Image (spheres, rainbow, N blue to C red):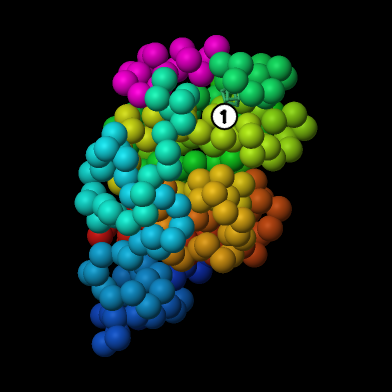
Amino acid sequence: MSTRRNEILKELGLWPVWRLRGPPAADNTAEATIPGIAGASPAIVSRSRSAGASPTVDALSGSAGASPAFQKRSPSVAGGAPALPLDPRAAEFMGMDWPQLKASVAGCTACPLHKDRNKTVFGVGDEQAEWLFIGEGPGADEDAQGEPFVGQAGKLLDNMLAAIGLKRGKNVYIANTVKCRPPGNRNPEPLEAAQCEPYLHRQIELIRPKLIVALGKVAAVNLLKREASVASLRGKVLAYQGTPLIITYHPAYLLRSLPDKAKAWEDLCFAVETMKNL
Ligand code: SF4
């Protein structure tokens, strides 16, 4: 592991890191131990899944069945529950290219959140990315700059990405479930999230990511359409409109809850392993 990466992990409070003690155990369950053991290699937390096996998808969570418009890179989650009925607004956005979609968001007044926004926050990154990270909605910094995950939470997210060898804008796209800032940094209302969701659908259609990582409970609940805690959703490969979905904590939450940084690191390692198998 590089010195730079070690520094990032220490900054994240993720030190010592998880490492394999040796070859995977006979039951194919990764064994976690501390660094410094000769011959150790970085471990991925496998949570009792068979090494090399394709991640299983919790088809009960989210819409595992992709609509015809959602042609995924990975066939691993094809089939399952049918996609949600197409929203009339979603139909409006189908066929839009990036410039058209961005223009539509910039002028959107479809929900009350448009009244207090300074800038819409469309999303940022590699428009052909394999990784899509989704948060809940813009905060004050994002509203001012028009970019998701800036400020302290954004810095932490960038460090989390760097810890697994990723970089904002390079094979990574970052978006939110709503494109306008909820006043006072409250959570988006269900109606607001529902009105904004067709934009996210179209972004996913255009990006065609291999894996989505939802950051925080609000994003997870809005994507999965069911109430659940992050703790109960972690460590599973779920699905959103046919794309594999993993849940972890929101960076803003991690800034307030340092002990959970280690869990977020586990989730990122799990995501890396999942991606390898897609
Ligand atoms: Fe439109 Fe979404 Fe902004 Fe609401 S949050 S006004 S639906 S862009």
Q: Is residue 77 left or right of residue 147?
A: left
Tell me residue 227's x, y (percent): 61, 56
Which contiguous range is marked in magenta? 93-107
Tell me residue 41's x, y (percent): 31, 70
The image quadrant of residue 90 is top left
Q: Is residue 9 above or below residue 91?
A: below
Tell me residue 233's x, y (percent): 52, 62
Q: Quadrant of the C terminus?
A: bottom left
Residue at horizontal 23 percent and vertical 44 percent from the top: 73
Residue at horizontal 42 percent and vertical 38 percent from the top: 85
The image quadrant of residue 222 is top right
Q: Is residue 256 left or right of residue 138?
A: right
Which image quarter has ligand 1? top right
Closest to the observer, 246 or 18: 246
* Dominant secondary structure, magenta: helix
Say if the magenta span includes residue 97. yes
Check disc 1 and report the residue beneath it: 195
Residue at horizontal 46 percent and vertical 31 percent from the top: 87
**Type of the residue with mark 1:** Gln
The image quadrant of residue 79 is bottom left
Categorize mark 1 by other alpha carbons within 10 Å: few (<14), some (14-19), many (20+): some
- Residue 23 visible in the snapshot: yes
Does the beta carbon at disc 1 come under 8 Å from ligand 1? yes
Closest to the observer, 109 or 164: 109
Residue at horizontal 40 percent and vertical 63 percent from the top: 58
Q: Is residue 267 above or below residue 136?
A: below
